[in-house]
Amino acid sequence: MPHDPSPPIRIGRTNVPSGRNAPASARRWARWLNPFLSRTATGDLQIAISELVTNSVLHAGLPEGQPIHLSARVFSDRVSVEVCDCGSGFAAIPPPVLPAPEAIGGRGLLIVQRLTERMMIDGISGRVRFELTRSGPADPQVPSRPVA
């Protein structure tokens, strides 16, 4: 189904410092999106953003405290979330596949892909975006500029 071409009704941006607390900081920031999503989608959002920020911390080569950029746009039909670490990037990859059972890692992008309706990867810039279908009131009473 094609997306509604209307502009976003809410936009939020923040930076979280790279480090062991970055995934929790990203999850806290993303709570402003809860009124726009079903309970299930809210859980999926929390897992997806946590996985992507964890990937940034582990694989981007960022020094401790370097910012990881988060942004979200709420449209009439979907919520779009982007994580960009501006780190070392990674080569173009095929769609994520399940690693061997004995592999320690390699499941993060696959988890995000399976939890979300759409995932786009720009490995060169270290940017991953995902989308979830929107539900909830058309214009819930949430701040138009969410705080970090």
Image (cartoon, grey):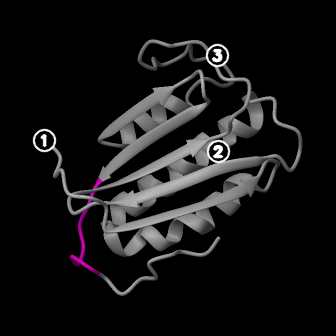
- Residue assigned mark 3: 102
Q: Seen from this angle, which residue lies furthest right?
A: 64
**Lower sequence index among marks 2 and 1:** 1
Q: Residue 22: within the magenta? A: no
The Cα–Cα distance between marks 1 and 3, rounded to whole angstroms, is 39 Å
In this picture, which residue range is highlighted in magenta?
133-139
Residue 24 placement (x, y as % from top left): 69, 60
- The image's mark for residue 107 is none
Label 1 sits on residue: 2
The x, y position of residue 55, in whole percent, is 66, 35
Separation (CA) of disc 2 from disc 1: 28 Å
Q: Nearer the viewer, residue 7 or 129?
A: 7
What residue lies at 35% left-to-right and 43% top-to-bottom? Answer: 116
Mark 3 or mark 2, earlier in chain: 2
Neighbour class for label 2 at 10 Å: few (<14), some, many (≥20)?
many
From the image, which quarter does the C terminus lie in?
Answer: bottom right
Q: Answer above or below: position of 9 versus 71.
A: below
Relative to 138, does residue 62 appear above or below in the rendering? above
Q: Are marks 2 and 1 in contact (CB under 8 Å)?
A: no
Q: Residue at x 45, y 17 (%)?
A: 97
Kind of residue at disc 3: Glu
Q: Nearer the viewer, mark 3 or mark 2?
A: 2
Give the residue drawn at x 68%, y 42%: 54
Looking at the rendered structure, the secondary structure element under dot 3 is loop
46 shown above or below 105? below
Kindly identify which residue carries mark 2.
53
Indicate the position of residue 139 as horizontal and vertical percent values. 26, 79
Q: Earlier in the sequence, mark 1 or mark 3?
A: 1
Residue type beneath disc 2: Val
Question: Could you say where residue 96 lies in the image, as x and y percent from the top left?
Answer: 46, 20
